[in-house]
Image (cartoon, rainbow, N blue to C red):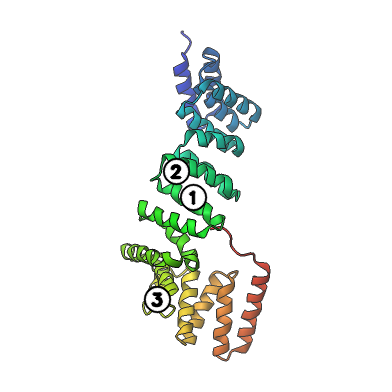
Amino acid sequence: MPRPQTPDLLRQGLSALQRGDLAEAREDLEQASESDPRNPYVWSSLAETYLRLQDRDKALSAAGKAEKLGGDNPVLVHALGMFYLNAGDLDTGLKFAKRAADAHLSFEYANALLHQEDFTRAADVITAALAQHPKDAQLTLALGVTRYGQRRFDDAIDLFLRTIELQPDALQPYVFLGKMLDQAGARLPKITTDFERWAAANPDSGVAQLLLAKALLASDEHSPRAADLLQRAVNLEPDNWEAHYQYGAVLESKHDYQAAATQLSTATQLAPNEAMPHYHLARVYDRLGESEKAREQREIHSRLTNTHNPETKP
């Protein structure tokens, strides 16, 4: 019986690897490497197989051979980039992400770097990829998240607005912009317009109603529409602590203290480690003449603000 040729062995090995049969994948791919030792695809496939078998030394050796033989082949560069990402070797993987300028690969590397809060290197990867893919919404969003992490809020806002232009139905840029309304400045009217459009297109989304209310309140703390929007948000998503908190704060400003206490109390129950609902609830209890409850909420607020670090990433 004739011995299988390299293409057949490679195809069989990849099929076995895909279905998780690592022993068969290793056998087929090692045979392929013996029959055609200069085939970079065989070595890159073996590298992935060895990695899944937790044989890191052999995996890195095979990846090195694939890189040496494969040159700048974009398919191979992508495969090796994913290999090093899976191997946790981000330093080596960065050069493949930059060489590939591949949108998906660059995003995966940037995401891994963002989880490590390595914002500088994440920005380098994404910027290089965006030069090749300037209309990629996912990369634009990722760079916005990076700038947010670097506290470069003006840049982040511009990038989130650009993401909305590219992909108007994407949730994340709206959520991030909702965190940055205090820094919006002259961009606030544009943000509000985008939120208006998004809320109108998503009438059953509590988040959309909440964020539009927040934008309106950022422009006018007495916005006549805000209370209605927040009431809708609470009704649509009763487990959303921020909707209850924002609605309670608006009711407090209207001197409807009993209703405000109900909303703020719900917010503290849904998110007990968020400090601001406790602060506002203490104020409301003071207005209601419930001094003991007010003191308890002030103590909780004080404890949280003294021990809880401010949020620095989404």
Point out the residue furthest to the bottom here.
Answer: 289
The spot of residue 226 in percent (x, y) is 39, 76
**Image spot of residue 296 (x, y percent):** 64, 81
Task: Tell whether label 2 touches label 1 (CB within 8 Å).
Answer: yes
Tag 1: amino acid: Leu
The number of numbered discs placed on residues in the rendered structure image is: 3
Q: Residue at x 53, y 78 (%)?
A: 265
Mark toward the start of the polypeptide (3 vs 2): 2
Mark 1 or mark 3, earlier in chain: 1
Q: Nearer the viewer, residue 237 or 86?
A: 86
Q: Position of residue 214 (x, y in %)?
A: 44, 71
Query: Mark 2 — residue?
Result: 130
Classify 10 Å Cα crowding around label 3: few (below 14), some (14-19), many (20 and above). many
* Snapshot quadrant of residue 189: bottom left
Give the mark, 1 or 2, whose residue is nearer the N terminus. 2
The residue labelled by disc 3 is 226
On screen, residue 146 versus residue 89, left or right, reads left
Q: Residue at x 49, y 86 (%)?
A: 258
The residues bearing labels 1 and 3 have C-alpha atoms spaced at a distance of 31 Å
Q: Is residue 209 left or right of residue 249?
A: left
Three-letter residue code for mark 2: Leu
User: Mark 3: which secondary structure?
Assistant: helix
Residue visible at 40% across and 44% down in the picture: 134
Q: Give SS at disc 2.
A: helix
Q: Which residue is mark 1?
A: 143
Say whether residue 172 is visible: no
Q: Amino acid at mark 3?
A: Ala
